[in-house]
Amino acid sequence: MNQNLNIRVLFRHSLLFVLTYISVSLTGALFVGHTAGITDDFVLFSAEGFYLYMDMVIWEGVLFATLLLGFLSTHEFGHYFAAVRHRINTSLPYFIPLPISPIGTLGAVIRIRSQILYSRHMFDVGASGPIAGFIVALLILFYGFATLPDPDYMQNFAGHELLNEYIEKHGTFPDEPISDTGNREPDVMVLGNTLLFSLIASFFDDVPPMWELYHYPFLFAGWLALFFTALNLLPVGQLDGGHILYTLIGYRRHRLAARGFFLVVMTLAGLGAIPLIQTFLEGQNVPLILTSWIIWAVIALALISRGFRAETTWTFAGWIFVLLMDVFLLILFDPSIFSGFTIWIFWALFIVFLVKIEHPPVPFEEPLTPGRKILGWICMIIFFLCISPNPIYFT
């Protein structure tokens, strides 16, 4: 019975991995696959065209999937082996295929089936994944930067005629995206820069701009690896960052730090939500600015109240803080610099409804060893180096 159960478990996890691999390969090929010289007629009505398509597009997607899932596997198995070492009942990684998403997956997770009793064990399980994954992310990025092709590489992709003309004339990328009319392209996907990515890029030549980065499989996979690392290191709730910071500073101080961080997230969410609400209200017979602020104020109050479990003082003080900070920032800065902040709305919802703000108490708290403390604060530094206020947005 146990042998049959183990076979079924291995089959289920293996199947999810294979489906995710296929999904990421196909969707990733849309970004990194070489498409210059390939037309629909050429692909559909000739064997030569079909094999050319497979060679130029699909295998590029396979490379991208190998890199991204290599990172995700390393991250999740870091958690898994740390849990096994401490005899914590846990599942193998569940890979989540999602072909309709931009990268073909929602990532991967493991399921902890038993309570973690000791803070030292909590730290080991929480920190092992980000540290292992971060090392792989760095290897992917350094290889990608070290093997960067010339800007002429963009000739491999259809639809970049004016860009390639600019590259042929100047030998480098333009400072802004170029459209068919020569103006700023309104529908370009931009990946947000981070302190670490910018630092590494500064040592190399021919680095593509952030709006063309997704055509480079190693750089795109490496950037996504940093993005997922930062997302997991958010210092709240049951995320890896929540586990780590809890074990570093204890329950009470983590409770304050996590609540403060959540208010920062809500402030950033407001900077993305208010312009979005105004967009939906355009054409309606309502005061545009006032109505959008009222709607956001109601949404913010509801989320903060739920996040703080309806604690009156925290809820209203946090609500006023968020609204005042949004007013201050939108007055002080050009609102256009907050393009891409819409993603913080989803992160606020993710925190409130899934991972929660506060970390539940660990039954047996114990001081971490000096080595663990150093690794823990390194993880917090990694979070700030890898986080971007506007990770993915469209100009």
Image (spheres, rainbow, N blue to C red):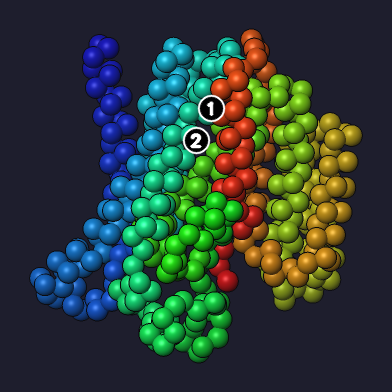
- Disc 1 from disc 2: Cα separation: 8 Å
Q: Secondary structure at mark 2?
A: helix
Dot 2, crowdedness within 10 Å: few (<14), some or many (≥20)? many
Q: Quadrant of residue 254?
A: top right
- Residue that numbered label 2 is attached to: 130
Check whether the beta carbons of the residues at disc 1 and disc 2 lie within 8 A of each other: yes
Task: Give the amino acid type for the residue marked by disc 2 in the picture.
Answer: Pro
Q: Where residue 6 is drawn, which disc sits there?
A: none
x 77%, y 23%: residue? 252
Instruction: Decide if residue 67 is on the left or right side of residue 292.
Output: left
Instruction: Decide if residue 116 is on the left or right side of residue 267.
Output: left
Q: Is residue 227 above or below residue 394?
A: above
x 88%, y 34%: residue? 312
Task: Give the amino acid type for the residue marked by disc 1 in the picture.
Answer: Gly
Q: Is residue 163 above or below residue 280?
A: below
- Residue that numbered label 1 is attached to: 126
